Image (spheres, rainbow, N blue to C red):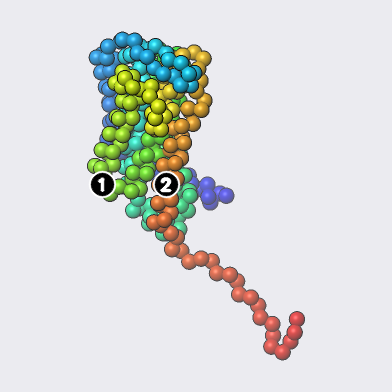
Amino acid sequence: MSRAWAVFRTGAGFALLEHARNRLALVLVVGYIPLWLTLEHWFVTPVPARFLLRASGRIVTVDGSHLTMVSGAINTVTLIVGFMMFMTTFKALAFDRRLALAGYPRPCLLLSKVIAMTVVSALIAAYATAVVCWYWDPVRPLLLALGVFTAAVGYGGIGILLGAFLRSDLAGLFVIIMASLLDTMLQNPMSNTGADKEGLQLLPLYGPTQVAVAAGFTHSVTPYGHLLLGPAWFLAMWLLGAAAFFARTRNHLPAPSAPPTPSLPTGRTA
């Protein structure tokens, strides 16, 4: 047990260190999130917007600029976490294969990256929520942070999957940007008048958006089921990426041989 814990702790430490060395991601966190939310606060008209809150089965009328800030927080966090997990998976894939070939336990290697992603997603979601709270007062900021966190986790899984299959960092970045922008735009009635149509429930940001809007504008609606949709997307994407990783790597260390069976002396019976 102590060896497994040491291996897992080492893997998680190196995964967190790799995220900390991603200077572009750090710049995006520190600068892009407040810049994007500030521009939305300044330039989006505070007109009433009707949002279908499926957790309660009713339409709520909210401030359009505040709703756009909620969508902006989700969009920026998913872009950054998806990008970070894609680059981590993409750049470390060859090294992770060598570790697996040398006998490093693959489950510990994969789980350590999940722990690192969870920590990073929680920190970035908390930071984005704090920026939102600087401009207005959501009804339940902790639940809002949790909704943004589930969005980050979902796109973190998508980043892992893309990093396991794509062969170009530019292609991965393009896919993550376009997917996050389109997903966020379709969920927001300020940019999509058909945001109440059926079928949007199949998109990764449906659950997190429902949670975030309920947290920002209502006192009693808590969409517990929608909280699981972001992690469910992560689990599905992570399982596909892990299956690809296990298929491409195997342990080359010799298997321990069984001890030789003692033979009876010649001419004697048991």
Give the mark nearer the N terminus: 2 vs 1.
1
Q: Would you say residue 29 is visible in this rendering? A: no
Position of the C terminus, as image quadrant, is bottom right
How crowded pointer 2 is (Cα within 10 Å; few <14, some 14-19, many 20+) is rated as some
Question: Please, what secondary structure does the residue beneath circle 1 have?
Answer: loop
In the rendered image, which residue does mark 1 sit on?
168
Whole-angstrom CA distance, mark 2 to mark 1, is: 19 Å
Residue 125 x, y percent position in the rendering: 40, 27
Residue at image position (48%, 27%) is 226
Q: Would you say residue 138 is visible in this rendering? A: yes
Residue at image position (34%, 10%) is 48
In the rendered image, which residue does mark 2 sit on?
240
Identify the amino acid type marked 2.
Leu
Query: From what the image shows, is residue 127 above or below residue 248?
Result: above
Q: Is 192 positioned to the left or the right of 212 in the image?
A: left
Residue 16 x, y percent position in the rendering: 40, 39
Q: Nearer the viewer, residue 205 or 193?
A: 193
Q: Nearer the viewer, residue 140 or 253?
A: 140
Q: Quadrant of residue 251?
A: bottom left
Identify the amino acid type marked 1.
Ser
Residue at image position (33%, 41%) is 86
Residue 14 x, y percent position in the rendering: 40, 44
Question: Please, what secondary structure does the residue beneath circle 2 have?
Answer: helix
Of marks 2 and 1, the one in the foreground: 2
Residue 95 x, y percent position in the rendering: 35, 53
Q: Nearer the viewer, residue 240 or 170?
A: 240
Check residue 199 in the rendering and tell me which mark sits there, or answer none. none
